[in-house]
Image (spheres, coloured by chain):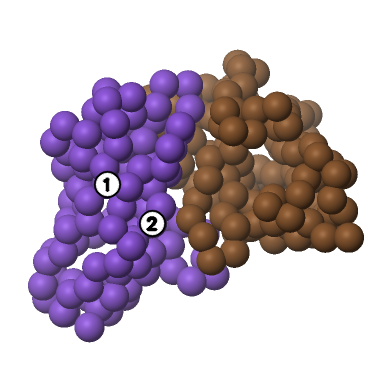
Chain colours: A purple, B brown
Amino acid sequence: QSALTQPASVSGSPGQSITISCTGTSSDVGSYNLVSWYQQHPGKAPKLMIYEGSKRPSGVSNRFSGSKSGNTASLTISGLQAEDEADYYCCSYAGSSTVFGGGTKLTVL
Amino acid sequence: QLQLQESGSGLVKPSQTLSLTCAVSGGSISSGGYSWSWIRQPPGKGLEWIGYIYHSGSTYYNPSLKSRVTISVDRSKNQFSLKLSSVTAADTAVYYCARGMDTAMAFDYWGQGTLVTVSS
């Protein structure tokens, strides 16, 4: 299994919106509505932000939203805030296994 | 509040076996609807799924690591473990344990992570 493809970096100014893409194949992202997204600050464990493509766990801001089209999933963060600066990873079920994306570094300018 | 805590050797010699344990508190590892996973992150790199064990005892492993990995559960101690054999420097990483939601296949609770270095 190959890692899902994410852009290495994205950036945006406070208040703006950004979108991070996550491209897989018909064996993972395209076949299952089981994409999750994780936020990771330096030196910390990842935190679940989105699951089942678009659902938010309790306590996660509604500024975070997820979607999917074909083999590509997306994470959108609206109203960017300084504390959103972190690494973001997508993850997909792939039939008896799980695969992560390579990660995207979000910089808030 | 569920908590997970990794423990084990932080330094392993090449060709030896890496062994880690994840102690679960605030909930039972035998609860249905969840899996128990190991995920690792080499320094400066991304996350890699290692494998998980379901409450039924079924295990699933990353195909690239399958020949070297064993995940097991000790229900009496409410913990689960990872063994990775024949390690090399490429296995140096922060190792995380995490709880997975069965139907969502997402990891909702994570341990703080433990750095394992493979070096002679």
Name the residue at 36% across, 43% down.
A4
Please, what is the three-letter code of the amino acid marked with disc 2? Gly
- Numbered tag placed on residue A22 in the rendering: 1
Q: Quadrant of residue B20?
A: top right
Q: Quadrant of residue B60?
A: top right
Name the residue at 14% across, 36% down.
A69
Residue bearing mark 2: A103
| Residue A65 horizontal side relative to residue B8, left or right | left
| Residue B119 horizontal side relative to residue B116, left or right | right
Badge 1, how many Cα within 10 Å: few under 14, some, many 20+? many
Badge 2, how many Cα within 10 Å: few under 14, some, many 20+? many
The answer to whether residue A47 shows anywhere in this view is yes
- Percent x, y for residue B29? 63, 32
Q: Look at the picture and state if A33 lies above or below A19.
A: above
- Numbered tag placed on residue A13 in the rendering: none
Q: Look at the picture and state if B95 lies above or below B67.
A: below
Q: Which chain letter matches label 1?
A: A
Please, what is the three-letter code of the amino acid marked with disc 1? Cys
> CA–CA distance between discs 1 and 2?
9 Å
